[in-house]
Image: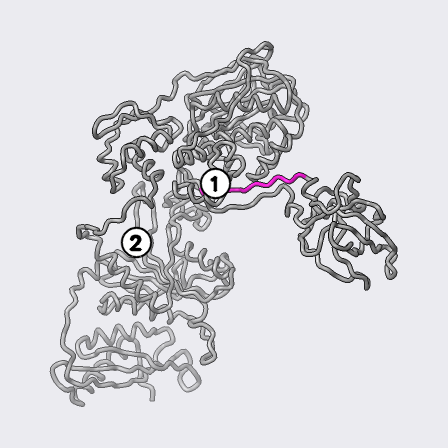
Amino acid sequence: MKISYNWLLELIDIHKTPEEISAMLTGTGLEVEGIEKYESLKGGLEGIMVGEVLTCAKHPNADKLSITTVNVGGESPLQIVCGAPNVAAGQKVLVATVGCTVYPTSGEPFKINKSKIRGEVSEGMICAEDELGLGQSHAGILVLPDTHIVGSKASNYFPIYIDHLIEIGLTANRGDAASHLGVARDLRALTGTEIKYPTSNLKSEISNLKSEISIDLEDTDCPRYSGLSISGIEVKDSPDWLQNKLKVIGLSPINNIVDATNYVLHEMGQPLHAFDADKIGGNKIIVKKAAAGSTFTTLDKVERKLTGVELMICDAEKPLAIAGVFGGMDSGIQSSTKNIFIESAYFNAASVRKTAKTHGLNTDASFRYERGTDPNITLDALKRVASIILEIAGGSVSSEIVDVYPNPVQPIELNFSLSKCHRLIGQKIPLTDTKRILAGLDIEVVSETADSLSLLLPAYRSDVTREADVSEEILRIYGLNNIDIPTQVKSSISTSPDENNFCLRNKVADYLSANGFLELTCNSLTKSAYYTEEELSNAVRMLNPLSSDLDIMRMEMMYSGLEMLQYNNNRKSSDIKCFEYGLTYQNIEGKYKETSHFVVYITGNKQGESWSQPQQASNYFSLKSTVLNILSKLGINQRLESSYSEEHTRLYNTTILSFNKKPLVTFGTIQPTITEKFDLSQPVYMADFDWKNVLSLVQANNMKFRPISTFPQVRRDLALVLDQKVTYGELERIALKSEPKLLQYINAFDVYQGDKIEQGKKSYALSFVLQDDEKTMTDQDIDRVMSKLIKQFEKELGASLRS
């Protein structure tokens, strides 16, 4: 939200700099994200002086250039080379002196330097109006009246509006602060300085009652509707003071009627809308729901299909506007408009929010209505805008003020406990300070006892309804910095069933981060376009999506990870190792299911560039070693079941590690058809741990320690010839099943395929490490084990020893 510093000081005169006000607002919770100086003329004509051309002669080396001497009030005249055809001696001109920066109407700003032009020194520039941003003309230099004083600043003759823009990051609950008046209220509560409320000079007696328009509220989503007619106005450009106010906060002036409504909206926080009164059929305004399936063309000339949830402002014949969101093209203000009807209404926040989200509209009006406006300010805002329009557009009031308010919104009565407040804050706040703060926030103290206050909460504070809310208001105005930090912190230690989960997560995270991995946190919302129609039948859809890209809960972890890789790859960061803990969501036959995952991604090179070793790309085995190390770190040292699949829809070279038929982790390479959609040309390797199964195995795995064997290990090697389709995993499974006690581990240290063996075959060179914890193994023991292994390989896989 944007606030004008000058405008704010018109409402509350606190004699503080923009920086001081920003610090004060941030302390109250209205976080200031930035301050920017505003000048109606960029650069403020700094360094631009009024000069007089003393002499003007033709440039000896250029037909279209002149050499002039110009008096700008210095000790000696300046020599300036000028290319304008209309330059002449005796003229008063604007001179950009050496060192200043010129901001032209179009194009980039540039700095004036002392230079040589075709061999002649030039000590400045005589300016045309477009070169200073004063207009569009470039036909020649700007010649000033003789009354301008030589040596004076140009800014003395060309008025420049200077202000400061204060950018506030407004939280969703502070709709009351979405205006200059709302911000001023917080400053009043802080400083005790009274607010100068916007006034109206609208006369109470109306003499010309010729444009009476009746109001009919058919829907309760509009609790209050106020209106007024003005006739005989002239639509034209707004005066400079109004245009400047709007430009500072980033609004483009349109015409005096629309600008006046925007002005009051940003001043008081009450959205207003002006209709062309001659286009209101039947002199009647009806507020009702839209007909489902009907269409309506808004001011942006877009035809929108209505769903039936929209609250519409209609006349006796047709819709005129989407209530609280956007006006209609047919009833908007045109240059030919002479009579207007001004709307100042209070709409239900939920209704406006739903409509705005349905049509993807975010207007200044909907922004405020969605957060809750003040139901009791409609008349004040209506009178304020009417008096401004009468001043700048002429005309006369041609109707009584119509105010339909069947069920007035009552202030909330609250019994407020001081002791509970002090306990929440952590410190006792003096009663005088408490009452001063409440008064500054328009919270009325009706009565009080020793420990409680009976309060009336203002209707415009839709977020303040409970004792805790009032305590928060007191705290933010009193100041968090004024709360003492206790010298002791007391806490109770509690345990929970999920405690082991966090310990294990942190253990794995510590291991991975120590090995160059970065932790990733992604949004649980994603886009439905990633999934097929069949998959979307189990999706958890958002009833009120923030955008079309965030319309379902993620069903897989992969896509959010790929979005992150794409973002980094687009910024020349392609060597990435990262991990994420998160949840996926499904709706299976009406029952919602959450699944915990721990995911690892690897792509790019293993290490950064180095003079000592060549670059080496990550591969499937980089991921596999990481997966096995994670399981080992968790104490999962069981002999896991390993299976391979080429039918996985998202991965290829897919490996699944399981225990007792429960899958622990699935890992492989993401399909190129998927990564290409994210502009990723290099392979992406992904491991997805089913964290619930991993956790249950770790918890059931009571770790036991045993002494290191005192007997030596023995290694034996075999070279086996096998069919090409046989995998190392099958060899490992058969070996460990055949000799589970003595065989400690098995390793493949060479694989050969070539003309030295039969076509369709391959050779594995395997090492087997044997150890008996009770004795030293003899040659007979070793030969018996190796013979048993060879027979099993021959029997199950058709293996033969390579000669």
Q: Please name the residue that numbered disc 1 is placed on.
A: 16
The secondary structure type at the circle numbered 2 is strand
Measuring 57% from the left and 39% from the top, which residue is drawn there?
248
Looking at the rendered structure, the number of numbered marks drawn on it comes to 2
Q: Amino acid at mark 2?
A: Ser
Q: Is residue 165 magenta?
A: yes
- For the residues bearing labels 1 and 2, Cβ distance under 8 angstroms: no
58 or 413, nearer to the observer? 58
Is residue 672 found inside the magenta-colored segment of the image? no
In this rendering, does residue 403 appear at all? Answer: yes
Q: Which residues are magenta?
A: 159-169
* Residue in view at x 83 percent, y 50 percent: 54
379 is higher (above) or lower (below) than 533:
above
For marks 1 and 2, give the one nearer the viewer.
1
Q: Residue at x 29, y 42 (%)?
A: 591
**Residue depicted at 54% across the width and 32% down the height:** 304
Q: Earlier in the sequence, mark 1 or mark 2?
A: 1
Dot 1: element: loop
Quarter of the rendering containing residue 508: bottom left
Find residue 129 and report its horizontal and vertical position in percent.
74, 44
Inspect the image, locate mark 1, and give the three-letter code of the amino acid beneath it: Lys
State the predominant SS element of the stretch in magenta: strand
With 602 as the anchor, is 433 left or right in this view?
left
Residue 596: give its label. Answer: 2
- Are there few (<14), some (14-19), or many (20+) residues within 10 Å of tag 2? some
Front-most of residues 498 and 241: 241
